[in-house]
Amino acid sequence: QYIGPSYYTFYPYDYVRDSNGDWYDVQYRYDPAQAPAISKFLDSAVLPINTAAWTTPLTAPYNGGYCLDIYEEWGWVAYGNYYDGFVHIFNMADGSYVGGFDAGSRMRDIAFDAAGNIYTVDNLTEWLRVWSPGGDWMAITGSDGSFVLIPEPAAIILLALGGLACTRRGRSA
């Protein structure tokens, strides 16, 4: 183990690595004072890496970390709480709390897709759920594997000069 071999006193359950090479991990503990739910370790040429760049607070409700994933587009790292099924989202850069939501209970896995939707799996109801970040969106996928999000509602107007413009329609009250 090269990431935090003397750092962990309990159970690291999941790891994710971002495009900078930094590592995020989640530790499984019922008592949040025993270990942080998420720790971030900066990429380093010197191994092992034993110092965390930041950790989540050692207070309730940040416990029961079982699974995590990152969404670099928005700078989010999220973990699922095994005990109450709550998803907690933190800022990847500094570990500040972004928000969260109740996704059920007995969280077993969490994942982001390319559009920022969050997939959660629990073993109590045995459901896979997909959670949208909100708002109306349209996605365009290309045959080359590209993926582009366009905020909706949007109307695409072809201009007489051959240009392409996107305008946002107003919403009525």
Image: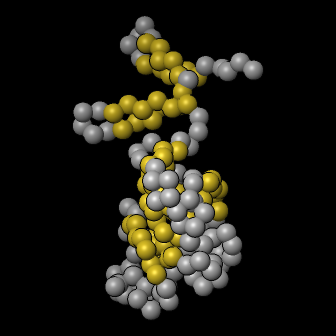
Q: Position of residue 147 (x, y in %)?
A: 36, 38
Residue at the (51%, 80%) spot, across then down? 52
Does residue 39 show up? Answer: no
Q: Locate residue 35: give its quadrant.
A: bottom right
Name the side, left or right, on which 123 lies relative to 61: left
Q: Quadrant of the N terminus?
A: bottom left
Above or below: residue 55 compared with residue 166: below
Closest to the observer, 16 or 144: 16
Residue found at the far left of this picture = 144
Above or below: residue 41 compared with residue 88: below
Closest to the observer, 118 or 44: 118
Residue at the (39%, 67%) spot, across then down? 17
Name the side, left or right, on which 56 lies relative to 164: right
Residue found at the far bottom of this picture = 6
Residue found at the far top of this picture = 160
Does residue 155 show up? Answer: yes
Closest to the observer, 51 or 56: 56
Residue at the (48%, 69%) spot, across then down? 66
Q: Quadrant of the C terminus?
A: top right
Residue at the (44%, 49%) spot, across then down? 128
Above or below: residue 154 compared with residue 133: above
Q: Locate residue 14: give its quadrant.
A: bottom left
Q: Position of residue 132 (x, y in %)?
A: 53, 41
Closest to the observer, 99 or 158: 99
Q: Position of residue 27 (x, y in %)?
A: 50, 76
Q: Position of residue 65 (x, y in %)?
A: 53, 70
